[in-house]
Image (spheres, rainbow, N blue to C red):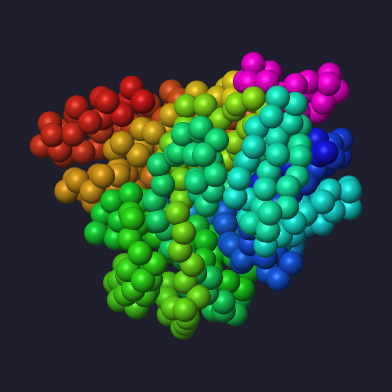
Amino acid sequence: MYDVIIIGAGVAGASFANKISRFAETLLIEAQDYNKEIPVRTNIFAEHNKPYIEEKFWNDQTIFPRPFLQLNYKSDKYDGLLNSEEFGAPLGKISHTEVFLKKLLNNFDNQGGTAHYNERIIKVNKHKDYIEIINDKGEAYKSKLLALATGSRGFDLQRSLGFEIPDSYMGIYTNIFADEELLDGNFNFQYMFHLNPNISPNGPFFFNVGKGRVSTGYLGNKESHNELSDKLDRILQNYEKIQKFMNGLSWNKNEFVSGSISKHPIKSFTKDRMIILGEAAGIVTAYFYEGILCGLVCADVASDLIKTLLENNSNFTKAELIKYEQEISQILLKGYFRNGDACEYLFYGGGAYVKSLWSTYTNLLLTNETVRKYVYEAHTIQDLSKYDTDRDRYVGERLFSALPTLSKLTLGPRFFKAMLK
């Protein structure tokens, strides 16, 4: 009998496993074969993630090989650059996320945790005193608590347990490897966020520039892998707005990776003896698709609560586990997520106005120091429960003021509704 079984070893699952295995008998199950390879991922890692990881990881240059110094909110007309030097400290770091996962899992193993890779759970049986899970080989494990951290890959299991399913979209990315000198010559930023409804009405085209590699891709809709892959290849080859960044780079279309990405939190992510972490619960920012922060917060909150419940010989009822939902709401949903909800409403959906609106915003970023400061501080705030939504309102008001008169007339109701998010 385990204290906790975790299904899924992404950022949320691996972080939770690392923390909870210090005081709980823990089994971690991952469907991918991590013994063979953890997939390469290059991500931005904003400074506001720092409170949720250990200092030894934060200071590890193999995990975070370069600082996040400059971002580019790019439109058709402008490179909306935000340089952290203006405000005295980096926006965060760039992570080689597979290294982070490997070190979390090594810690988990050293703390006595048990990990099973290349194993799928096909059934969960709920009993009064425990949860029983059964894998694809017919093997069964028992636990006091089950934690689902399956990202957007475990919806069938999640649905079978009576949980809602978050909205999800298909995304595609690839890592392009190149010499540091070439990358430094091509990119004067570490992160680019570019909106073009002709690429996708649902999310950005992006660059994340790591050490010796750059990750690039876009968020689509419900297309097949081949459709997404063909489009990404065409973008990298022909899209005029990014060709200055692609000079000298080459890629292998067969290495493109696609998969679903969730957002919009489900109404409840706890039941008796069960919790859901991170992306599996749709706890991903609606605009930036920022999932790492949310996975780290969920792992931190859950581990603190479960430690107390174990010490009190809890039955892990929903009434006890509801504190997990309440704290996630306090840290993320009541403030920080409202910014993403408002931006999603304004900029996504494919309306004809999106390009001009995004162009106006990127120019505002270039010309308004206060706007730059507020965007910078959204990346660096250490206590997200104190996130100030009035600053978002200020940016929204400045954006509306910068629009042409005709656009103000047509977009006024949309801005008003966004302010109420």
Percent x, y of residue 41: 59, 62
Q: Quadrant of the N terminus?
A: top right
Give the magenta-colored segment's residue range.
Answer: 300-322
SS majority, magenta? helix
| Farthest-out residue, top | 319
Residue 30's quadrant in the figure?
bottom right
Query: Does the image show residue 8?
Result: no
Q: Is residue 365 left or right of residue 294?
A: left
The picture quadrant where one finds residue 219 is bottom left
> Measuring 46% from the left and 45% from the top, which residue is drawn there?
262
Whether residue 205 is visible, yes or no, is yes
233 in relation to 89, above or below = below
Give the residue at x 28% y 51%: 201
**What residue sits 50% from the left and 57% below the top?**
191
Residue furthest to the front: 138
Q: Is residue 385 above or below residue 74?
A: above
Q: Is residue 375 above or below residue 386?
A: below
Magenta-span inclusion, residue 283: no
Query: On the rendered structure, is 12 left or right of 198?
Result: right
Q: Left or right: 122 with respect to 401?
A: right
Q: Would residue 307 be counted in the magenta stretch? A: yes
